[in-house]
């Protein structure tokens, strides 16, 4: 039947939620790193007991913790993220140049073949890689040195690299997303990068169709269809059928095209999940109804999923890294809220229950499917 | 012998049960830089948590106190008060009161 382990990062520590394949009875372990912000915990696809956690506070900065026993024990590894070469500038909120500086880790993505290799997406936007289990970090500086980077802006959350997609069939192909710059793709293992934002239209920009400058909130890719990408951007749900060469708007009948996370069903590459928020000014569900929307057609046609979710007086947000799926036969879908709830649907979104309702605000949710 | 008081989170990170850490600081005059170098040498996991890796500067929301004085803005290479260097008074690393 298999088991699931849900790695939850919150504003005040990390929690690990575990259940068997029925996904009804849950054990909750935590907080780990109590009092610290945990933006993300990532589990290796090769060795699921190898976890990496991004632990930080404004006082004491960024730490990186590693576990080799599925989160029972942790050890700090290197937290030294030094930019390679001469550090240039990006634009600040007021369009003045601002020197690049490391602020925090937003996202870890473990290699699909080696548990000691892990990527880190950081703020200010840059991509780092460790090949020794986090003992050292080396910047893949071709991204930050892209000619467009002097014009990248921070978003409300900072200038952050928040999404890293790896391709099981081609380890040299990497795709990342940066707020606010857009999506970028490398075909040579991260050495060189090209923007992949054709088709994005951001009417808040002086040039709405510019090559870079788009506020991409999240990307999703199904492992068996690596050229099929989905994007939750600041204003639209986008789809690419050619690995990001071009994008089309598939927001369709959604009540709002603003939101943060986007996930793809484990077994159906055309089944996609989003959690619309009322608007970019409000960041909560319309009329207090918390609803996940599912498209079984790769976008455009969306259905609300609300069974078991609060349908009254619910004004929480769901952040970009806070939704994921398991790979059991009945694909489970999970998300966490700014109100501290973590929900699961063990039947692909038809019915939802709260695993827990009173954690600190949830920053990230990653699901591991275990034997 | 130098006595150093760590804030709660750094004490946990260092794995210290006691409120104070005892450090040996080598080489003549005791300065804040030498104290922090000795602290990070003994507890490498504290690297980057008190001082910025790149600049070596005190992190903005960390302060240093001793003998009832705020030493945060003193030169890191200035001698600390004798009572700290003799271990009679602790050197305190404090997370600033901030937030709500």
Image: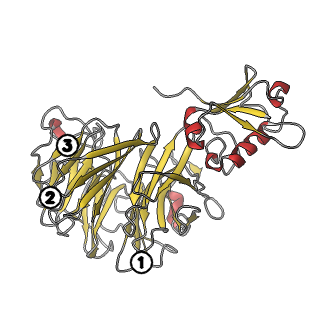
Residue named by callout 1: A171
Give the vertical position of B72 relative to A174 (above or below): above
Q: Are marks 2 and 3 in contact (CB under 8 Å)?
A: no
Q: How is the image coloured?
A: secondary structure
Q: Secondary structure at mark 1?
A: loop
Q: Quadrant of the C terminus of chain A?
A: bottom left
Report in which chain the residue with disc 3 lies.
A
Residue named by callout 2: A348
Report in which chain the residue with disc 2 lies.
A
Q: Nearer the viewer, residue A322 or B6?
A: B6
Q: Quadrant of residue A173?
A: bottom left
Q: Secondary structure at mark 2?
A: loop
Residue named by callout 3: A354
| Image side of residue A311 versus residue A34, left or right | left
**Does label 3 or label 1 sit earlier along the sequence?**
1
Distance CA(mark 3)–CA(mark 1): 37 Å
Crowd around label 1: few <14 · some 14–19 · many ≥20 (10 Å): some
| Image side of residue B30 versus residue A323, left or right | right
| Image side of residue B41 versus residue A69, left or right | right
Report in which chain the residue with disc 1 lies.
A
Q: Secondary structure at mark 3?
A: strand
Name the residue: 48% across, 47% down: A55
């Amino acid at each position: 039947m298999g088991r699931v382990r849900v790695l939850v990062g919150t504003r005040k520590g990390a929690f690990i939620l575990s259940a068997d394949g029925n996904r009804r009875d849950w054990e909750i372990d935590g907080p780990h790193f109590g009092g610290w912000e945990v933006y993300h915990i990532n589990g290796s696809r090769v060795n699921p007991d190898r976890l990496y956690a991004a632990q930080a506070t404004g006082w004491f900065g960024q730490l990186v913790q590693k576990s080799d026993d599925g989160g029972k024990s942790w050890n700090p590894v290197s937290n030294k993220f030094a930019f390679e070469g001469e550090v240039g500038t990006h634009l600040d909120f007021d369009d003045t140049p601002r020197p690049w500086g490391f602020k925090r880790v937003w996202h870890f993505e473990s290699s699909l073949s080696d548990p000691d290799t892990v990527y880190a997406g950081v703020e200010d936007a840059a991509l780092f890689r460790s090949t020794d289990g986090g003992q050292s970090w080396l910047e893949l500086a071709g991204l930050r040195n892209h000619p467009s980077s002097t014009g990248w802006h921070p978003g409300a959350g900072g200038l952050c690299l928040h999404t890293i997609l790896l391709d099981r069939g081609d380890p040299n192909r990497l795709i990342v997303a940066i707020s606010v710059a857009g999506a970028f793709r490398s075909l040579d293992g991260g050495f060189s990068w090209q923007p992949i934002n054709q088709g994005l239209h951001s009417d808040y920009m002086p040039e709405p169709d510019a090559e870079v400058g788009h506020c991409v909130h999240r990307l999703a890719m199904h492992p068996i269809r690596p050229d099929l990408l989905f994007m939750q951007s600041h204003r639209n749900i986008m789809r690419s059928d050619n690995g990001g060469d071009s994008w089309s708007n598939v927001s369709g009948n959604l009540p709002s095209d603003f939101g943060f996370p986007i996930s793809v069903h484990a077994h159906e590459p055309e089944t996609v999940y989003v959690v619309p928020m009322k608007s970019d000014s409000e960041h909560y569900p319309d009329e207090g109804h918390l609803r996940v929307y599912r498209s079984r057609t790769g976008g455009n046609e969306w259905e609300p999923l609300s069974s078991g979710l609060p349908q009254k007086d619910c004004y929480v947000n769901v952040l970009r890294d806070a939704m994921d799926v398991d790979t059991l036969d009945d694909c489970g879908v999970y998300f966490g809220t700014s109100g501290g709830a973590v929900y699961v649907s063990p039947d692909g979104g038809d019915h939802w229950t709260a695993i827990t309702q009173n954690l600190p605000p949830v920053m990230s949710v990653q699901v591991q499917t275990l034997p | 012998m130098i006595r150093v008081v760590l804030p709660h989170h750094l004490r946990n990170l260092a794995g210290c049960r006691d409120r104070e850490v005892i450090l040996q600081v080598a080489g003549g005059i005791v300065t804040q830089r030498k104290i922090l170098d000795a602290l990070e040498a003994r507890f490498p996991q504290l690297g980057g948590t008190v001082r910025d890796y790149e600049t070596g500067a005190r992190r903005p929301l960390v302060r240093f106190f001793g003998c009832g004085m705020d030493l945060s803005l003193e030169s890191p290479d200035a001698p600390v008060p004798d009572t700290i260097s003799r271990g009679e008074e602790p050197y305190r690393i404090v997370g600033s009161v901030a937030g709500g």
